[in-house]
């Protein structure tokens, strides 16, 4: 019998610090016996494939064989070694430790039987692999060529805490593992009460994992939730969690609504290749036919694309805004790299009618338009080029024909000269567009401009920034009528054909003088800013040019110091204008900051291009503009606030307000946005809009939260959408129960109320359930997008 804590090193020399113990030199016979023990254990552990391997996700640790260099040394350490020559057995007892490569085996007792060529580990058996997966068992036995094995009272835990617990397990034919009376769960053990059942698990009389087929089969299976049995099935099969792609059914979706009735969607996934796949997801509805839905995805060496198909033959909508019985859509998106600097792609959608995708909940019912494009773009060094073909389509019944148009194409090219010119930066911008709208207007243009800017700082900190711009435009216009642009000023002498030349020259300077002071831990910066911009007093009648890209204008503090405040190329400021304001910044040592801006713009000379019917409510139509202000506060990472306000120049009445805030305090999170618009370009004269949007959550416990959202039109006292919900989420399970209302109405889109229950099981995908709220809240509702 060897001395306590016998150590045995393999036939290679031991690493430093692992010198053989004195017991190894007790005699030649004992040395031979120890060599035999080493050979036995080395042979046993080297091919130990069935029980453990690389652990990444799911059950990968029982799939892959460990990669160990058979020439590496092995260390065996135990309290006692017993050699039973009569029965051809060698036994290591007491705190047995075996280290081989990156693998560790710990047990109370390890027995090698030379007669049956088996190796058995008994008592508190633990096996840890290179990736951190740990197998615990009462007894592990390996037989024959060690390809097939048997594990008693198995408990397997991976690095991400996925577990399989079984009374026993065996390996068959080298690629099949069978667990008897076992259960599977990806949920973590409760730290406060380890004996507490996991959130969910699957128990089965037999669990079979087939490595070659990448499947896990459960026979006589019961799904447990919070320790209670919920569903029993005689047979259940799932893809091996280590397999990213495998053909099969996905989780079904059930919903109910007034418009569609009971609806079941059953997706089937086709894993056709490692670089392309297809999902077929027919939606069977009670009232609106069977919707066929398919999604094709493909990756290539330099990009990828997808195609979404949907179609239905439905007679139920013959009285609605649909022509014919067939309704459908095609949506496709792709992007490909030509080289490190150039790429091209597309984002295209076409549908049979305006409401198809919203009616069947394929898109949000808040969508108001469709935009399709094909593009080519490149960025290299100081050059940028973008070429895009657009098609726009309105989805609202009330929209005018000019809302639908085609741009083929619009080209932007920007270039910044590498070396300074007259001490400043010189850049060139160009734009070309060919435009055609459904109401017959054609507008083609070519625009080239050069910009120069230089910043200079004198000895007392004053900042002077002179700038200049030269621009030339060529327009080709056709099919133009009077009173386009929403303005009686928009008239052309030849609406059917015309070439319009336009040029502009700008010179100006910006002056800033920041003052800085510190009070305690706060740094204050007060910065007066002034700009004066000189241009030609008039460029003729700009209303001869159709306004296609300068229809949006929100005059606020972010536009105050822009050289030209129009949003697009089709309109240009003229005359001499001055922009004056002041900016204050407070920077705190904690990282918090506050910034405030206030200012006004003045038309000093020349024609004011904002003094037209369309832009008269913009705040820039008078010689002295409305006042604009901005306040931005970032108190902490959990609290922020912003406010942008425009005040009437004479009465100081509020003309526009935009407020936004977010706050997180303990378990509560809230976000609020508010907008009050008393008149903006594009709105009908005198039309006002006032709206508030809120969303928030409150964590009741570590796992349970309350959710809420609210969108309300204050001008018409009408709710747009609102909802409330309850969420449970832990490491392996998520459950949402929500009630949502929508009051949107357009063509065959009706107001809606619904319940939605959505839950996710780790490794088993998601399942969604939606239920109409009609009858509970006494209002007419319909199902909306899941």
Image: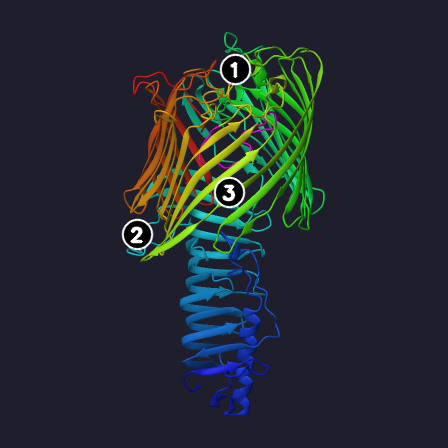
Labelled disc at residue 238: 3
Q: Which one is closest to the eye, mark 2 or mark 1?
A: 1
Label whose residue precedes the other's in the sequence (3 or 2): 2
Label whose residue precedes the other's in the sequence (2 or 1): 2
* Residue 332 in sight: yes
Most prominent secondary structure in the magenta stretch? loop
Q: State the image quarter where residue 13 is shown.
A: bottom right
Label 2 – label 1 distance at C-alpha: 60 Å
Q: Which one is closest to the eye, mark 3 or mark 1?
A: 1
In the rendered image, which residue does mark 1 sit on? 399
Is residue 690 in the magenta section?
A: no
In the rendered image, which residue does mark 2 sit on? 196
- In this rendered view, identify the residue nearer to me: 760 or 428: 428
| 133 to 529, vertically: above or below | below
Dividing the image into 4 quarters, which one contains the C terminus?
Answer: top left
* Residue 740 in sight: no
On the image, the x and y values in percent for residue 208 come to 50, 49
Label 3 – label 1 distance at C-alpha: 50 Å
């Amino acid at each position: 019998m060897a001395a306590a804590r016998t150590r045995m090193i393999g036939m290679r020399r031991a690493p430093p610090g692992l010198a053989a113990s004195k017991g190894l030199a007790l005699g030649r016979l004992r040395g031979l016996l120890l060599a035999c023990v080493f050979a036995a254990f080395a042979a046993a552990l080297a091919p130990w494939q069935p029980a453990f391997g690389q652990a990444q996700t799911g059950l990968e640790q029982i799939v892959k064989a460990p990669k160990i260099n058979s020439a590496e040394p092995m260390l065996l350490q135990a309290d006692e070694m017993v050699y039973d020559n009569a029965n051809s057995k060698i036994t290591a007892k007491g705190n047995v430790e075996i280290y081989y490569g990156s693998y560790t085996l710990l047990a109370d007792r390890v027995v090698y039987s030379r007669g049956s060529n088996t190796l058995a580990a008994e008592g508190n058996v633990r096996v840890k692999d290179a990736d951190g997966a740990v197998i615990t068992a009462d007894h592990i036995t390996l037989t024959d060529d060690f390809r097939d094995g048997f594990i008693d009272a198995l408990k397997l835990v991976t690095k991400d805490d996925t577990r399989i617990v079984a009374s026993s397990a065996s390996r068959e034919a080298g690629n099949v593992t069978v667990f008897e009376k076992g259960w599977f769960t990806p949920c973590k053990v409760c730290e406060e009460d380890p004996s507490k059942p996991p959130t969910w698990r699957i128990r089965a009389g037999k669990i079979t994992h087939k490595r070659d087929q990448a499947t896990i089969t459960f026979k006589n299976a019961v799904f447990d939730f919070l320790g209670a049995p919920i569903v029993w099935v005689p047979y259940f099969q799932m893809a091996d969690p280590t397999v990213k792609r495998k053909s099969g059914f996905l989780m079904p979706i059930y919903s109910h609504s007034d418009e569609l009735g009971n609806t079941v969607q059953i997706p089937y996934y086709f894993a056709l290749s490692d670089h392309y796949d297809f999902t077929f997801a027919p939606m069977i509805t009670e009232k609106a036919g069977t919707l066929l839905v398919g999604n094709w995805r493909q990756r290539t060496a330099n990009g990828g694309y997808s195609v979404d198909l949907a179609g239905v033959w439905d007679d139920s909508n013959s009285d609605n805004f649909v022509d014919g019985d067939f309704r459908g859509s095609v949506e496709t998106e792709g992007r490909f790299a030509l080289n490190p600097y150039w790429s091209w792609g597309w984002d295209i959608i076409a549908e049979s009618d305006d409401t198809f995708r919203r009616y069947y909940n394929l898109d949000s019912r808040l969508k108001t338009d469709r935009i399709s494009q094909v593009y080519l773009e490149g960025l290299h060094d100081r050059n940028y080029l973008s070429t895009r073909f657009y098609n726009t389509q309105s989805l609202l019944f009330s929209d005018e024909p000019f809302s639908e148009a085609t741009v083929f194409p619009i080209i932007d090219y920007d270039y910044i000269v590498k070396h300074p010119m007259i001490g400043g930066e010189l850049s060139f911008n160009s734009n070309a567009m060919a435009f055609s709208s459904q109401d017959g207007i054609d507008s083609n243009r070519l625009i080239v401009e050069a910009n120069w800017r230089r910043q200079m700082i004198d000895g007392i900190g004053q900042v002077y920034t002179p700038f200049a711009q030269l621009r030339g435009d060529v327009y080709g216009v056709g099919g133009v009528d009077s009173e386009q642009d929403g303005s009686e000023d928009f008239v052309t002498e030849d609406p059917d054909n015309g070439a319009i030349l336009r040029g502009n020259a700008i010179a100006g300077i910006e002056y800033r003088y920041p003052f800085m002071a510190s009070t305690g831990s706060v740094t204050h910066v007060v910065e007066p800013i002034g700009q004066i911009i000189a241009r030609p007093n008039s460029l003729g009648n700009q209303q001869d040019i159709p306004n296609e890209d300068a229809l949006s204008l929100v005059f606020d503090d972010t536009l105050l110091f822009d050289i030209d405040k129009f949003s697009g190329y089709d309109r240009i400021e003229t005359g001499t204008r001055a922009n004056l304001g002041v900016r204050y910044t407070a920077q705190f040592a904690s990282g918090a900051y506050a910034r405030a801006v206030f200012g006004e713009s003045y038309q000093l000379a020349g024609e004011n291009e904002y003094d037209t019917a369309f832009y008269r409510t913009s705040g820039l139509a008078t010689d002295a503009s409305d006042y604009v202000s901005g306040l931005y506060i970032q108190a902490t990472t959990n609290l922020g606030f912003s406010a942008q306000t425009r005040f009437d120049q004479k009465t100081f009445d509020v003309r526009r307000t935009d407020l936004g805030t977010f706050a997180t305090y303990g378990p509560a999170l809230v976000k609020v946005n508010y907008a009050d618009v008393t008149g903006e370009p594009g709105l009908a004269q005198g039309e006002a809009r006032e709206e508030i949007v809120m969303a928030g959550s409150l964590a009741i416990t570590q796992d349970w939260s309350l959710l809420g959202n609210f969108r309300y039109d204050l001008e018409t006292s009408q709710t747009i959408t609102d909802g409330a919900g309850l969420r449970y989420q832990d490491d392996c399970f998520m459950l949402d129960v929500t009630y949502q209302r929508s009051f949107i109405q357009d063509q065959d889109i009706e107001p809606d109320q619904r319940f939605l229950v959505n839950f996710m099981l780790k490794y088993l995908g998601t399942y969604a359930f939606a239920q109409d709220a009609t009858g509970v809240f006494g209002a007419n509702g319909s199902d909306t997008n899941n």
